[in-house]
Amino acid sequence: MDGPKFTIPPEFQADLRYVEPRDARTDEEIIAALDAFKPVESEKNIWAFWDSGIQFLPAWCKRNVANWSRLCGPSWTIRVLDARPDSPNYALKYVAADMLPEAFAKGTMEGPYAGAHSSDLLCGACLYQHGGVYMDVGILLFLDLDRMCWNTLADDNSPINVAIPGMYDTVIANHFTASRKGDPFIKRWHELFVHVWGNRTSHTGMASSPLLAYAYQLDITVAARKGYHFEFAVDPMTVFEYITQVLCWGRLCRLEDAGDGFSCADYAMNNILWFDALKEDWALEPIVGFPGPNAFEALSRRLDADPESEEYKTAYKAVWRVLTRSSMQKVSHSKKLAPKPGLGYYWDENDGADCAPGTFGELLRYGSVYFEQTRESIATLQVEKPKDTVKKGVLEP
């Protein structure tokens, strides 16, 4: 058997160990096997979505999904759902049409973010009906899901039933959600989002719902103070409409028991694992910078470049930081939202750049599968109950 392609530097040998992947198949074999209907037989499901189907995923996203299988192993069932009625992975073969807006069932969703919002709508439906983890196909995974959060969620002695990346206060990032089947908070989150969506065919106007009025009081400068230096080329209302599902989560965190015996606010504090999104999901950005070109250049840097150059040092620091202490790296396109395209756009346009031989990108890909983190826990947040809670029903203005 061939030895490791890359070695772990001495300074990181306490943080990483070499392992063999849990799935020895090629990318092509894994993707081909996933292009088939698989009945739900447990809660250990990895759900994702690509509207045109798994075979039409960008190549770098196919590599993401294949590596999920290598990292998590056969105890997890991966499904990349789609919006094609003739597909074995058609979303409505797994969730009931009446759990989703009419626009999804009829295929009439439109607008620049139709794919993203279709995925958002499926998230709550899949998790409530079946359980598991719902992930964006743009996620490079570095820690297997059992160790990351599922062992905690599956522990009958643990009160934790949901795991979510938290940014600050009760603001979440919705590219990853893990939940046990039938969770009451996920149920209400999904119902609220579907209600706010209503009969629309696009996201336009959603954030103006009176149910989300609290959002207008949010201090949008907090994100930057907490280290999230994402830039936007659109007005705040467009951002709010893009992240309506996130705003729905925030509303639930402000709802006390209104008479049905369930306090969303208490549940959010006591039964949800909030992990640190900046440390676990976006560790690359604070080192290389938040604009997409920065990450693209860093990961395209050659491993045999001058190690004394600042560019090399930055790429080295960023990649080993992610490999040793990140659960994942969320790669975005920043489609029409940011002044500059996200890393995902550049990987779309430069096929193979995410794993080009001799680059830090190749090292990152290799390490995500062959280097296992030794840490015993992930970085979590202690979230406080909002001061503006109210006793109202989920759909009560």
Image (cartoon, rainbow, N blue to C red):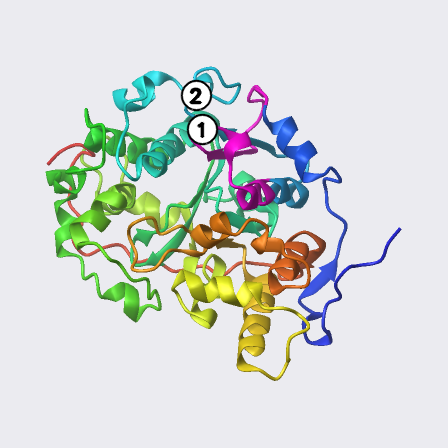
Give the residue type at disc 1.
Ser
The C terminus sits in image quarter: top left
Q: Is residue 241 above or below residue 318?
A: above
Element marked by disc 2: loop
Compared across the picture, whether 53 is left or right of 324 comes to: left
Q: Which residue is mark 2?
A: 84
Furthest-bottom residue in this view? 308
Labelled disc at residue 85: none
Specify the segment rendered in magenta: 36-65
Q: Which residue is mark 1?
A: 52
Residue 382 in picture, x, y percent from top left: 38, 60
Residue under the image location 84 percent in, 58 percent down: 3
| Depth check, front residue: 208 or 269 | 208
Q: Residues within 10 Å of mark 1 (few under 14, many from 20)?
A: some
Residue 144 in picture, x, y percent from top left: 61, 48
For marks 2 and 1, give the CA distance: 7 Å
Residue 182 in picture, x, y percent from top left: 42, 28
Compared across the picture, whether 369 is left or right of 151 comes to: right
